[in-house]
Image (tube, helix red, strand yellow):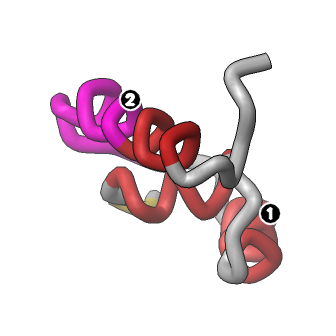
Amino acid sequence: MIVADTNILCYLLLPTSYSELVDKLYKLDSEWLTPTLWKSEFRNVLALYIRKEIITFE
């Protein structure tokens, strides 16, 4: 079991330089726990990525 913060979830779900490493980690152990606030923090990261045009809304 891995306790993952929002940064780790972002690396897993969004295109980053760490995505490949986190994907390997997820394949080793897919049972993860996250803090209660992860959804709110993840929305903030998505908003930042959209503002910086790293991802699009679509």
Task: Find numbered disc 1 in the image and state the secondary structure of the residue it sits on.
Answer: helix
Task: Tell me where residue 22 appears, x and y as whole percent.
Answer: 67, 71
Tell me the residue that label 2 is attached to.
Answer: 43
Task: Tell me where residue 6 appears, x and y as whole percent.
Answer: 36, 51
In contact (CB < 8 Å): disc 1 and disc 2: no
Please report the residue visible at 54 percent of the width from the left and 48 percent of the height from the top.
49
- Quadrant housing residue 15: bottom right
Task: Sort mark 2 into few (<14), some (14-19) or many (20+) by Cα contacts within 10 Å.
Answer: few
For the C terminus, the image quarter is top right
Task: Tell me where residue 20 appears, x and y as whole percent.
Answer: 81, 76
Three-letter amino acid code of the residue under disc 2: Arg
The magenta segment is 33-44
Three-letter amino acid code of the residue under disc 1: Lys
Precedes in sequence: disc 1 or disc 2: 1
Calculate the distance from the C-alpha at mark 1 to the C-alpha at mark 2: 25 Å
Tell me the residue that label 1 is attached to.
Answer: 27
Residue 34 is covered by the magenta coloring: yes
Above or below for 38 versus 54: above
